[in-house]
Image (cartoon, rainbow, N blue to C red):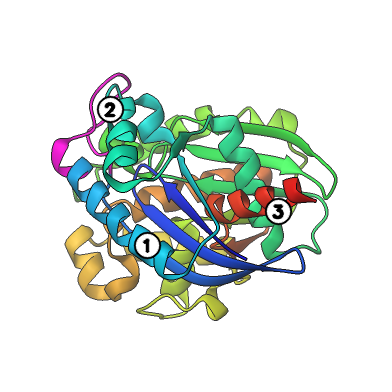
């Protein structure tokens, strides 16, 4: 049985097509596009028309892939950009009428739960762990073990929104960097009350996977080399010293296709990751590409049991 899962985020739209064998998920297709629905979007505002049209084109392309692979079920979830946009219901209606896909806007807590499921499948031998999912408009932090989620929260900042708030002008001024650091420290400080120190971290989504590729000098994403790779504190410090020297176009030129679509927001993602690592005093970050779209299918499998 083949199942498709689409994750409509604030920066990216991701497709996973997987087959289910003996209640296990086996990936067949992974695709990535970056329409950046959350750009210049504020709570109660509208997603821009050109970005909506780009989204429709992406979903039409994905739907052809889904049909070609005879998927028996299609799960489409949308997160922060669609949660806060005033025109999200109109977009969902048009997607249903024109493309035939049913989009479900999920809450931040539901997103956190599903991201935890996806990340846990990447490194199943970890019992207690912290999962971080850095999106375009929100960041989910989840602490749990193999039996239950103990703490989860969706924080209202991500790589796109943080860049627009503090880091739109390059080179970054000392004041901008300090304001960013103070903002992130204050925003995430409450996790110290809920999450024990020095637990293993699994970080999912584009920020950690792209940073891992840069560390490994990979110009293209190679899942076998990225999935389960690790980033230490010294790696993040080194990456920060490197990335702070370049603007988005220079990062794109220097590091190649692996950064396309996030070249101008990668530095913000790195700062979010570093801040959480500091607050949790975690020595190592385990990197995974298995986020929400994987969690959607795993949750579906679990409900069938």
Is residue 190 found left or right of 195 in the rendered image? Answer: left
Q: What residue is rendered at 67% in x and 64% in y?
A: 122
The mark lying in front, picked from 2 and 1, is 2
Could you say which is closer to the camera, residue 15 or residue 257?
15
User: Can residue 110 be spotted in the picture?
Assistant: yes
Tell me: residue 61, above or below residue 199. below
Quarter of the view holding residue 197: top right
Is residue 164 found left or right of 71 in the rendered image? Answer: left
**Mark 2 or mark 1, which has the lower sequence index?**
1
Where is residue 3? Give x, y as percent. Answer: 56, 60
**Mark 3 or mark 1, which has the lower sequence index?**
1
Residue where numbered disc 1 is placed: 32
Q: What residue is rendered at 29% in x and 36% in y?
A: 166
Disc 3 to disc 1, C-alpha distance: 23 Å
Residue where numbered disc 3 is placed: 301
Where is residue 265? Give x, y as percent. Answer: 31, 51
Where is residue 270? Give x, y as percent. Answer: 44, 53
Q: Is residue 48 magenta?
A: yes
Q: Do callouts 2 and 1 mark residues in contact (Cβ within 8 Å)?
A: no
Could you say which is closer to the camera, residue 4 or residue 222?
4
Quarter of the view holding residue 242: bottom left
Quarter of the view holding residue 142: top right
User: Can residue 169 be spotted in the picture?
Assistant: no
Badge 3 marks a residue whose secondary structure is helix
The residue segment tinted magenta is 37-51
Where is residue 117? Give x, y as percent. Answer: 68, 50
Disc 2 to disc 1, C-alpha distance: 24 Å
Question: Quadrant where the N terminus lies?
Answer: bottom right
Q: Do callouts 3 and 2 mark residues in contact (Cβ within 8 Å)?
A: no
Badge 2 marks a residue whose secondary structure is helix
């Amino acid at each position: 049985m083949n199942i498709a899962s689409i994750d409509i985020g604030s920066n990216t739209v991701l497709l996973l097509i997987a087959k289910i064998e003996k209640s296990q998920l086996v990936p067949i297709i992974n695709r990535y596009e970056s329409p950046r629905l959350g750009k210049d979007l504020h709570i109660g505002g509208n997603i821009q028309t050109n970005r909506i049209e780009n989204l429709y084109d992406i979903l039409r392309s994905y739907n052809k892939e889904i049909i070609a692979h005879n998927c028996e079920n299609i799960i489409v979830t949308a997160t922060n950009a669609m949660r806060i946009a005033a025109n999200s219901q109109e977009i969902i209606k048009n997607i249903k009428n024109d493309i035939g896909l049913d989009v479900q806007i999920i809450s931040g807590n539901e997103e956190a739960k599903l991201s935890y499921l996806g990340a846990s499948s990447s490194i199943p031998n970890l019992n207690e762990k912290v999962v971080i999912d850095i999106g375009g408009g929100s960041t989910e932090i989840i602490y749990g073990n193999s039996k239950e989620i103990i703490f989860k929260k969706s924080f209202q900042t991500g790589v796109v929104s943080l860049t627009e708030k503090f880091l739109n002008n390059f080179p970054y001024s000392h004041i901008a960097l300090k304001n960013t650091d103070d903002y992130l420290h204050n925003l995430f400080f409450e996790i110290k009350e809920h999450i024990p120190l020095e637990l293993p971290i699994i970080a999912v989504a584009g920020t950690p996977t792209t940073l891992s590729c840069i560390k490994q000098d990979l110009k293209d994403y190679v899942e076998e080399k990225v999935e389960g790779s690790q980033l230490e504190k010294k790696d993040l410090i080194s990456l920060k010293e490197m990335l702070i020297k370049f603007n988005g176009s220079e990062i794109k030129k220097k590091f190649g296709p692996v950064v396309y679509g996030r070249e101008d927001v990668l530095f913000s993602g790195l700062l979010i990751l570093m801040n959480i690592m500091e607050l949790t005093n975690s020595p190592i970050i385990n990197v995974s590409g298995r986020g929400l779209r994987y969690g959607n299918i795993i949750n579906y499998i679990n409900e069938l049991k």
